[in-house]
Amino acid sequence: MFKDTDFIKSCDVPGPTKEAIRAIILYKSDVSPTDKVVDCGCGTGGITCEFAKRAGEVISIDTNPEAIEITSKNLEKFGLGDNVKLINDDGANALKDIDGIDIAIVGGSGRQLENILDIVHEKLNSKGRIIITAILVDTKVEAINKLKSLGYNPQIMEVNVSNGRVLDRGILMISENPIAIMTAQKR
Amino acid sequence: MFKDTDFIKSCDVPGPTKEAIRAIILYKSDVSPTDKVVDCGCGTGGITCEFAKRAGEVISIDTNPEAIEITSKNLEKFGLGDNVKLINDDGANALKDIDGIDIAIVGGSGRQLENILDIVHEKLNSKGRIIITAILVDTKVEAINKLKSLGYNPQIMEVNVSNGRVLDRGILMISENPIAIMTAQKR
Amino acid sequence: MFKDTDFIKSCDVPGPTKEAIRAIILYKSDVSPTDKVVDCGCGTGGITCEFAKRAGEVISIDTNPEAIEITSKNLEKFGLGDNVKLINDDGANALKDIDGIDIAIVGGSGRQLENILDIVHEKLNSKGRIIITAILVDTKVEAINKLKSLGYNPQIMEVNVSNGRVLDRGILMISENPIAIMTAQKR
Amino acid sequence: MFKDTDFIKSCDVPGPTKEAIRAIILYKSDVSPTDKVVDCGCGTGGITCEFAKRAGEVISIDTNPEAIEITSKNLEKFGLGDNVKLINDDGANALKDIDGIDIAIVGGSGRQLENILDIVHEKLNSKGRIIITAILVDTKVEAINKLKSLGYNPQIMEVNVSNGRVLDRGILMISENPIAIMTAQKR
């Protein structure tokens, strides 16, 4: 397991996805060592590192070259990356050349979520899983509606985490911002 | 109503108590224009300003001279303060000279919560209300247990608030830290 | 103040709006004894009762005749109602005949939120306040976008409350469902 | 992965530990196929089933014979249990005969948490992990203080989850009760 503070960070790149959210995504993904995973909008690389340890193959995409660089550094820091391919492109473009996806994580979509989900749906294997994280309220509605329109039976979980600082005078709880996790599985 | 950002602040003084928490405290206090209110650990003065507008008399106490100064500045900023007495002392000490309390707000206790509640209990009018806010987990347990031992039927509500930033790309929710509000009413 | 359990309830009518939410709505409404308040989708009447105690005039609307009946019973139970007018109609229809609104609470909109907000906007006094509560994620986005399109600078707060059961073995926290409160003020 | 609704339940047995919490516990446990795991207060067996799939050996303890029975039924339902030993005893007693623990999960302690942690500490391997879940506020404080007194550097995370019901009229979020997860690792 990684601590949130283990990751190399950059001011201009969002993430890493926080520990509790990484844990829930991993659980919901039901990842196995033969799975082909796409991490769309990889940011700092938190999700990429987790799946690099557990999946067969990971393809991580981000439009921001700095995100690709930071993800690469984090993979290297943890001795990972042999099974990871990094692509500096926008999600929709990069996905067009990828087939046979078992798990698609969409953490960033640059306002192209519907387009990305259309392509993911096409490229996803039977029994494949889609996991979308959202920090914007609007993205929750957009993701659920798009998944419904693609014939999925989507689920949504919202997670509010607070972490304690164990001080001499007592336990002080500090909140993370709420994150929604939307999931769907192809029949 | 005040916005959180309306208050003059100082780095060395906690507060102001956030809007939703002030609203809930006001509601639970059932304050009326004849009530005598004590604000123990007034900090930035958020609670003091709210009760100055609605109660008959407010006595605000803080061990930190800077808290008294900031509270005074905030009262002045909002044209309040005629019915407010500010005391720079520790809560237990100051409370000894105060009688006939209708509403006691304990937001800071400097590790003397049990002692303060003993004195508040003695000085509280029949039907008087005690409201304790806590950011430490330990304080919740301590407050509830002490109120029980004093014969009260205490209640506790924990509040997690997030506020939206309405951006062009959508609504981003930002969390406040959790606050617990413990209340009890004298028979 | 009312406890949640003080209200007469009916299985077929939603509400009452929970204590913490009523407290925050009251605070944000900045209600004064001369204000004219509309409670659109009054349900069990929790909000109606609160404003009946504090405003000049309250007009409460619900399409469900049982909601009107329960609201009426709750007003009677608390010795309120002299300044309350109950209308059994859909919100948009009823609002057409109401002018000079100081505070509009929209807790239920029967899928007509945009339409209702158009009319509220037209009928709202200068400095008037709109407060919308939402239990659906979709309503949050719809309300914020509509308020923006009407020229408002809307705000959104999401509230997660848990209430303690003070048991012999300790304090057990029980969660309420999350509620969002969207607010806007006319210039 | 299991859904919460996959587990056989009984009215008189708490649990199963909810999906998000199981996911976070699994992640924090850093479980490997050679680990020896103790599940103290196994209840419905949610945690036991998860570790039965991933660990070398699982010993699950509950004072309630019905909990042992339900855990056994759930293991059977999922085709698990070959590496699981079920003990119907109180935690402190049962733990005395167990050595070389890699992961100790304490989800129920029957008011003997300190006693149980003393024994767990003694029986825990170097680098072993302790994970305590709490629904009572008091248990959070007790666990953190006891872990500190045993020389650990404990951590605490509180998790508030809500799950969406995707309805025709929109997404309705339903809250789970808050759960705290306290963790510590032996040097």
Image (tube, coloured by chain):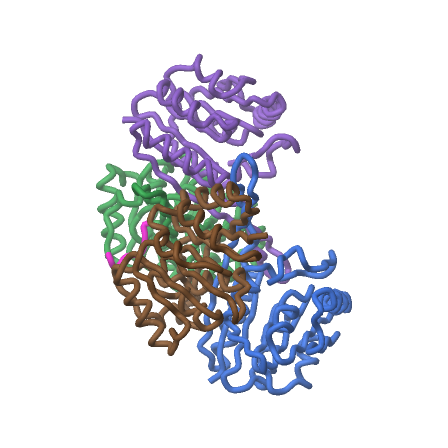
Chain colours: A purple, B blue, C brown, D green
Q: Is residue D29 above or below residue D122?
A: above
Q: Position of residue C49 (x, y in %)?
A: 40, 69
Task: Give the camera-side residue of D95 and D76.
Answer: D76
Quarter that holds the C terminus of chain D: top right
Q: Is residue B29 above or below residue B19?
A: below
Residue beneath the point at 48% across and 60% down: C101
Q: Is residue C149 above or below residue D149?
A: above
Task: Give the camera-side residue of A34 and C56.
Answer: C56
In the rendered structure, the answer to whether residue B111 lies left or right of residue D41 reads right
In the rendered structure, the answer to whether residue B54 lies left or right of residue B63 reads left
Q: Residue furthest top?
A: A97
Q: Quadrant of residue B166?
A: top right
Q: Position of residue A187 (x, y in %)?
A: 27, 26
Over which residues does the magenta segment extend? D11-16
In the rendered structure, the answer to whether residue A184 lies left or right of residue B26 reads left
Residue C35 lies in the magenta-colored region: no
Magenta part mainly helix, strand or loop? loop
Query: Is any atom of residue A40 visible in this view?
Result: yes
Q: Position of residue A52 (x, y in %)?
A: 48, 25
Residue beneath the point at 52% across and 70% down: C34
Task: Give the camera-side residue of C128 and A173.
Answer: C128
In the rendered structure, the answer to whether residue C41 lies left or right of residue A176 reads left
